[in-house]
Each structure stands twice: as structure tokens, then as C-alpha cells.
Image (cartoon, grey):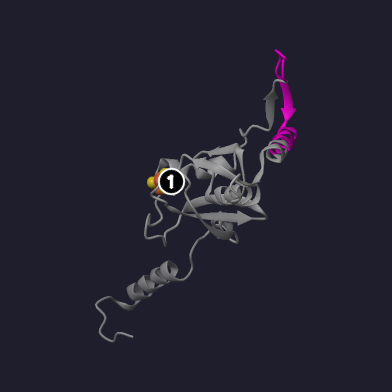
């Protein structure tokens, strides 16, 4: 307590009351106190932007089994939390209500397109991959060298495939099915 205050006692009391209001009793609304960042309680998964060779680090936020946000990783020595416009759009490729859920299929010798569900298309691709691999798989070359490969199928990926998808493709197509012609437009 200051003994020789510049202000008279009533003024000191008023100033002290105002300071108390400022420092202790904050006038937050109920809405303000209930607000929370959208990523609160979300699990953070590290990833890498799939677009270009800079290889910016991403934090992917997952809640209830769903991706709710993707941001640049602040702890990354490469991008320090920043992303270029392409990298910033990564979330929209993962979660997008405009994503196609049907395909157009034109049967051999037909002149008409049919609308088919996506699951049907995936099944068709799987069947054709299996058939082609069965028909073209080579265990040994003529000189006896073991190769266990097929040259009848190739894979060409694009930059909107994320790093996890590329990893799975490499595992399945190369290690699993023996496909050797695997390419991707992006370079990580
Ligand atoms: S596309 Fe942009 S965000 Fe993605 S790695 Fe390249 S510079 Fe980084």
C-alpha cells in the first residue's frame, strides 16, 4: 500500500476498482467461453504434400475417423507451417462434396454410355488387373533368371495422390503383383 499517494483516497479506490474489473472479471459471453478451435481433440497425423519436390510437411487432423483439416506443419524445417496455394487445397481433394461417386461406362462395341456406381468400376478394374497379371506373369526368363514380374500392366499416378496412397500403390503393384512400370508425375 502506498502511504503518500498522489490521488485522494476516493479516487484511489475508484481506480483500484476499475483495474480489478480489467484484470479479474472478464465480461465473456457464454458463446465466447464455449468456443473452441476446430482441431481441438483431433488426432494429428504427419504427412507430406504430394504436389512437388519441395516436400512441405502437413499436419492432418482426424476426428471420429474423418479428416477435418489439413494444415502446414509449423515444426517443419522445410515450410515452417506455410503452404503454397496448391498445398493449401489438399483438404479439398480429401473432403469434397463434388467428388464423383459414379462413372460412365461404355461396353465393348456399344455406342451408348451407362452410369455405373464407383464400387462396380473398382471391381471391374480389379478383375481386369487379375486377368492380365495371370496371363502375363513371368517367373523366370529364358536364361533361367528369376524375375517374378509382369510387363503387361503399368501404373501412372498424379500429384493428387497423397504420399500414403503412393506408398500403398508401390507396395501392392510392385511388391505384391510384380508390376515394374510404375510412374508418378510428382517427385518427392
Ligand atoms: S506444392 Fe506447394 S505446398 Fe506442396 S510441396 Fe510444393 S511448395 Fe510445398
Could you classify mark 1 by the number of other residues whose Cα lies within 10 Å: few (under 14), some (14-19), or many (20 or more)? few
Residue 111 falls within the magenta-colored stretch: yes
Please tell me whether residue 73 is drawn above or below residue 132 in the rendered image. Answer: below
Q: Position of residue 48 (x, y in %)?
A: 48, 53
Q: Which residue is mark 1?
A: 187
Q: Residue at x 67, y 38 (%)?
A: 136
Report the residue that reaches farthest toward the top.
111
Q: Position of residue 123 (x, y in %)?
A: 74, 37
Q: Quadrant of residue 40?
A: bottom right
Regarding mark 1 in the picture, which secondary structure is present there? loop
Question: Residue 45 or 146: which is nearer the viewer?
Answer: 146
Total residue callouts: 1
Question: Residue 159 or 184: which is nearer the viewer?
Answer: 184
Q: Position of residue 118 (x, y in %)?
A: 71, 34
Question: Residue 155 or 72: which is nearer the viewer?
Answer: 155
Q: Residue at x 50, y 61 (%)?
A: 27
Residue 79 falls within the magenta-colored stretch: no
Q: Residue at x 39, y 51 (%)?
A: 82
Position of 33 compared to 101: left or right? left
Report the residue that reaches farthest toward the front.
143
Position of 52 compared to 8: left or right? right
Q: Which residues are magenta?
A: 108-129
> Looking at mark 1, is its residue's CB closer than 8 Å to ligand 1?
no
Pick the quarter of the image with the N terminus: bottom left
Q: Position of residue 110 (x, y in %)?
A: 72, 15
Q: Quadrant of residue 122?
A: top right
Amino acid at each position: 500500500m502506498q502511504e503518500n499517494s498522489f490521488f485522494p483516497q476516493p479516487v484511489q479506490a475508484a481506480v483500484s476498482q476499475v483495474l480489478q474489473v480489467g484484470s479479474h472479471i472478464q465480461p465473456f459471453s457464454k458463446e465466447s467461453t464455449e468456443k473452441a478451435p476446430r482441431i481441438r481433440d483431433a488426432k494429428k497425423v504427419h504427412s507430406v504434400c504430394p504436389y512437388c519436390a519441395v516436400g512441405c510437411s502437413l499436419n492432418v487432423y482426424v476426428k471420429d475417423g474423418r479428416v477435418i483439416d489439413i494444415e502446414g506443419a509449423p515444426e517443419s524445417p522445410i515450410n515452417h507451417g506455410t503452404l503454397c496455394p496448391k498445398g493449401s487445397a489438399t483438404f479439398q481433394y480429401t473432403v469434397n462434396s463434388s467428388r464423383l461417386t459414379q462413372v460412365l461406362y461404355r461396353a465393348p462395341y456399344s455406342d451408348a454410355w451407362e452410369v455405373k456406381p464407383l464400387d462396380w468400376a473398382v471391381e471391374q478394374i480389379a478383375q481386369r488387373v487379375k486377368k492380365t497379371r495371370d496371363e502375363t506373369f513371368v517367373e523366370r526368363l529364358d536364361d533361367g533368371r528369376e524375375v517374378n514380374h509382369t510387363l503387361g500392366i503399368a501404373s501412372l499416378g498424379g500429384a493428387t495422390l497423397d504420399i500414403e496412397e503412393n506408398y500403398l500403390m508401390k507396395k501392392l503393384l510392385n511388391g505384391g503383383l510384380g508390376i515394374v512400370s510404375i510412374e508418378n508425375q510428382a517427385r518427392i
